[in-house]
Amino acid sequence: MLELTVNGKQVRKPAKTHMRLLDFLREELYLTGTKEGCGEGECGTCSVRVNGELIKSCLMPAVKAQGADVVTIEGLAKDGKLHPVQQAFIHAGASQCGFCIPGMVMAAADTLEKNPHASPEELREGISGNICRCTGYRKIFEAMDLAAEIMTGRCDSATLDIPQEAPPSYIGTSVPRVDAKSKVTGALKYAADMTLPNMLHVKVLRSPFAHARIKSIDTSLAEAMEGVEAVLTYKDVPGEDGFGVFVLDQPSFAREKVRFVGETVAAVAAETEIIAREALAKIKVEYEPLPALFDPEEAMAEGAPVLHNDYPKNLSRHVKIRKGDVAEAMARAEIIVEGVYGTQVIEHAYLEPEAGIAYLEPDDTLTIVSPSQNITHHRHDLAKILNRPINKIRCIMSPVGGGFGGKEDQTVQPIIALAVLKTGRPAKYVFTREESFIVSAKRHPFRIRYRTGMTKDGRIIASECRIIADTGAYAQSGPGVMVKAAVLSNGPYQIDNVWVDSISAYTNNTPSGAMRGFGATQMHFATETQMDRCAERVGMDPLAFRRLNCLRDGDETHTGQALPSVSLLRTIEGAAKAAGWEEHVPGSRHGRTTAADRVEVKGS
Amino acid sequence: MKKRGVGVACNWYGIARTATIDRAGAWAELDDGGTGKVAVGVTEIGEGILTVLCQIAAEELGIRPEDITLSDNDTARAPEAAHAGATRQTYMCGNAVALACRDARKRLDKVLAAHWEVEADEIEARAGRIWPRSKPEQAMSMAEAVHLCKSRGVVPVGSGSFTAHGTPLDPDTGRADVWQTYVFGTQIAEVEVDTGTGEVQVLKLTAAHDLGRTINPQGVEGQIEGGVVMGLGYALMEEFVLDQGVTRTPGFSKYILPTSLDIPEIESVIIEDPDPNSPLHAKGIGEPSMLATAPAIINAIYDAVGVRITQLPASPERVLEALREKEARERAAAAER
């Protein structure tokens, strides 16, 4: 029996032996403001106070809290009045997706209560164990500075009150975020915070192989376990099993083959998560490993194993841009700059792991609640997969604890949908952080080759760009990524002759998909580094080089689209003025400006 | 030794879906008490669109943002608005909501025009008050106006559908009008490189972005700051490592993200080049905010220490290796002389 004080109230409840303090708070007390972002003490979303000390509740066994005084985000407001840190977070606009915010507010409040006179560096240090993926931290710093002013009495808390007077227009006004209070108090319910009566918990058995044939799946031992309601495999899919954004090449459950480490092979729906996990261990899958591909260029080579029968060359998408005559222009170019660039695989790292809860409504509508960035498209795909009229599927978008494109492609949705259809009971599935890393789509890694032809006074007359991307085992948003990469390659510059090949290949790596910038992020790194090199080669200041070549009102893009208004020059001048840009040629002053020099100059 | 440098990069981006037609729908109703109900099929992923939609609806309906009730994002209870991505929320959903609200106001204004014996186009409303321009003394609260409208048998409801036009790429040449509106930006990074460790600290990032028309300045800054820091992680530290298809970075202890200790000063410079093709003239900022960050940082590293990083991320190991190679090259060149 666990006896402790939580938010000033005596609590006496049995705690299961496996429970962490985080589980006890969330599952026994329904205090879901404390979030699980990683389960390994790295992200800080589960921060609470125990006996006056800030701790990560995912690392503390519940039994260790025996007799302790625990404060969670729900207990931070006093007598109906928000804590100054909470008020300051609202005022500064310091929350975005909000998933990190309860933990962040706890860490900020702890830091400031212990030392309201802390220096800016100490304040930053105080929240350095808490990750935020949305805000860039600046507004959080602002909020902490503001809270410090209030807590030291240097500033009246009335400054944080929301002005009642209507502005001349609501457009162009920093209206406080309408969801800010629900985020700083932990009141907002994300999918993992929701529970339904009679709900089952789902866990998934994933492929340990990058490429293998499935010879057999034996689920009998798992099915016989007490507390297991259903085991699901590809055999349980009633419709055409394929999802994706542009091509429907990914099955909800692997059928015949697995194509990446982490692919869904089977799922268990059970009374508890622990039973579900135990049942996974009893599923026997026989695999026959197949030769695997981990490099997009090798994947497209002659004789490479074929990953998808519909794509015999493993070529997922090839986008071309042909404008003018690049060969002729390169021949008359006075300077040609070549560059090769590589970008890495990136994880979205939203703080909220994928999650979902699904149930049947009285009229037989199947409802799926999840942090989906694309409920419209998911409903289309699910109608096919489940072989169900589309209006008997209802997708609800729960508050998204960070997306950045990573929640556009489906993850938990078909699995919980099938679990509900097989059992008739509500089902919930929450990814672990590791699952989120292994299963969800990544930012495509690109290999980019540029050749830029110029006149000797710095005018770009030809540009050639070859892109090869690894889209991984399934295309997901990849085909669209290759289009955007192609269209925005070669930058916002007026170039008469442009040649682009934007190619993605299937491999047995984790699927790549949509991520903020959608192919343009990779291309901008390469293009703008190439522009810096070009400026250096012709001995020009990089801003002057861009002014010379940039698109102007009425110019045509590389795809031949005329743009009536181009604001690029205005942004160049705006940035140059704000940053105090000093003209220079790249590479001309290495080592000139050391920190020590700067300090001396400033002091003299 | 620590050395400083500056670098610049520009960006461009298209708003809403690429090389295709894009669409979003919304419903609106002026409700009892002078409040507003708005339904639109997709919304918040953290970027602040709920607030932006409340501002737009309040402005168009003539009430206050706090008077707006937004529906849940639900395929069974709200009109389609497609997806939350492609920097399309303010542009697509925002304009759909504006059109729906204008439609609802048209129903209300028709009834009030008859009541006041004025033309409907001279009725104005703001922050919960509504009046005819020629008879401002007859102003009433929006609650009274809605009540009056309903007492004449009319529920002031409206709907809106907004379209953005893009054409598919010609398969051979790529020719297309890809988006109907574009944004541009320029970022300047100032960095400090530790030549002993290879560590790069970004000191300041200046970000100038065209976004058409600002709806919520604080929200715009938040998007820019978040994008810049995501770009900083892309440039300097983040890498999902795969070895024969197995990840070696399966969690936050191995996958390194920017924390509060890595954050530069960020100055946002907002440029407004209004979009002529939409009722609100706003464009977007979500994705473009991060595009120029990594190359600006990489170019600043080159300015500081003369090494060109061409494979991301510019981790301390990679910068240090590049510095050593550069030293070796310089020594070899000196020996030849």
Image: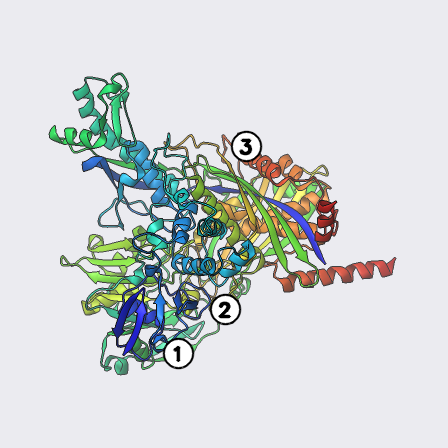
What is the secondary structure assignment of the residue under circle 1? strand
Q: Which residue is mark 1?
A: A287
Q: Which mark is residue A510?
A: none
Q: How many marks?
A: 3
Q: Which residue is mark 2?
A: B253
Amino acid type, mark 2: Ser
Q: Distance between the Cα atoms at labels 1 and 2?
A: 31 Å
Residue B222 visible: yes
Q: Distance between the Cα atoms at labels 2 and 3?
A: 48 Å
Q: Are marks 1 and 2 on the same chain?
A: no
| Of marks 1 and 2, the one in the foreground | 2
Left or right: A391 as drawn, with respect to B179:
left
- Residue A514 is situated, as x and y percent measured from the top left of the image, at 43, 54
Left or right: B210 as drawn, with respect to B82:
right
Disc 1 and disc 2 in contact, CB within 8 angstroms: no
- First in sequence: mark 1 vs mark 3: 1
Residue at the spot 30% in from the left edge and 62% down from the top edge: A193
| Of marks 2 and 3, the one in the foreground | 2
- Frontmost residue, A65 versus A281: A65
Amino acid type, mark 3: Asp
